[in-house]
Image (cartoon, rainbow, N blue to C red):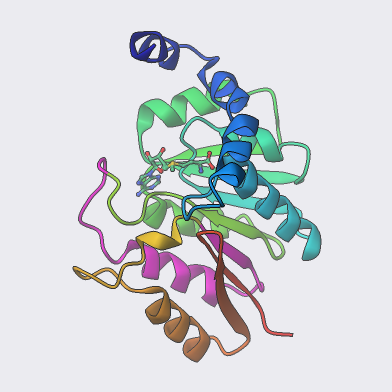
Amino acid sequence: MKAFRRLLKRTPVYGVYKALGHRPDYWYWILRGRPARSPHLLKQKTVREYGEKYNLKTLVETGTYYGEMVAAMRGRFDWIYSIEYVAELANRARKKFARYQQIRIFGGDSRVVMPEVLALLTGPALFWLDAGYYGWVGKQGDQQRLSAELEMILSHPYPHIILLDDARGLTGQNGIPSVADVKSYVESKFPQRQVEVQFDILRITRRI
Ligand SMILES: C[S@@+](CC[C@H](N)C(=O)[O-])C[C@H]1O[C@@H](n2cnc3c(N)ncnc32)[C@H](O)[C@@H]1O
């Protein structure tokens, strides 16, 4: 099975194969009593819900990976911009989505590429920050990346909405901020924003 999976990973259909597992994963997660690590289908549902709730037409994602979120949100947003650090994954996603003019895949470190993406925006957008901010093996050591990106997005002229995946990674240990640190930083520096966490997703929205 492992060998088959490894082989499949090299083919363009790997994203589709992964997507086949989303529904069983979701039900397995419910059966296990909704543990902290949430399934991709729930993440898709959350991204969709926030897009609809705040009437956002653009989705910006950090961490394209195999393009599962991009594929799932293709018909839901007018524009999708996704940033991927690993060149092979970025190239693969570019090929996969080449026929969709509304989708752009950017290669590089999200911290470096973010200003280029922000410059394209003409209104508020939904940000899905999912680029393994703490502990992603391919790119360790930049502990400031999350705060740098949050600062850029929240200081931008439009009132963007931010969803950060893997909130459980905000441990408050070894130089990593805790959820409380992020909440107090965001809410004190940007008083129009509020921060909450549900199902392992940290949500930065507008204070009503
Ligand atoms: C958890 S996966 C993303 C899953 C995807 N967002 C989804 O919902 O299907 C994390 C991805 O972030 C990428 N990544 C890690 N560090 C990055 C960085 N500094 N800039 C952009 N992408 C990065 C990894 O290569 C990996 O593809």
In which of the image's four quarters is ligand 1 placed? top left
Quarter in which the C terminus is drawn: bottom right
Q: Where is residue 178 in the image (x, y as percent from the top left)?
A: 35, 74
Going by the image, does 33 lie left or right of 206?
left
Quarter the N terminus occupies = top left
In percent of the image, x 38 and y 64: which residue is there? 146
Counting from the top left corner in percent of width and height, residue 89 is at 42, 29
Q: Quadrant of residue 73?
A: top right
Q: Which residue is more in the foreground, 112 or 16?
A: 16
100 or 137: nearer the viewer: 137
Residue 126 pos. (x, y %): 65, 59
Coordinates of residue 161 in the picture (x, y in percent)? 64, 67
Task: Count numbered badges in the picture.
Answer: 0
Please name the residue shown 70% across and 29% down the image: 100
Camera-nearest residue between 86 and 65: 65
Q: Is residue 14 above or below residue 3?
A: below
Image quadrant in which you'd find residue 20: top right
**Residue 108 located left or right of residue 38:** left
Queried whether the magenta region covers residue 162, the answer comes back as: yes
109, above or below 74, in the image: below
Q: Is residue 78 magenta?
A: no
Q: Residue drawn at (65%, 51%), measured in percent from left and top?
A: 59
Q: Give the range drawn in magenta.
A: 137-164
Q: In this view, does 68 lie to the left or right of 151?
A: right
Relative vertical location of residue 44 with respect to residue 114 in this rendering, above or below:
above
Q: Residue at x 51, y 18 (%)?
A: 14
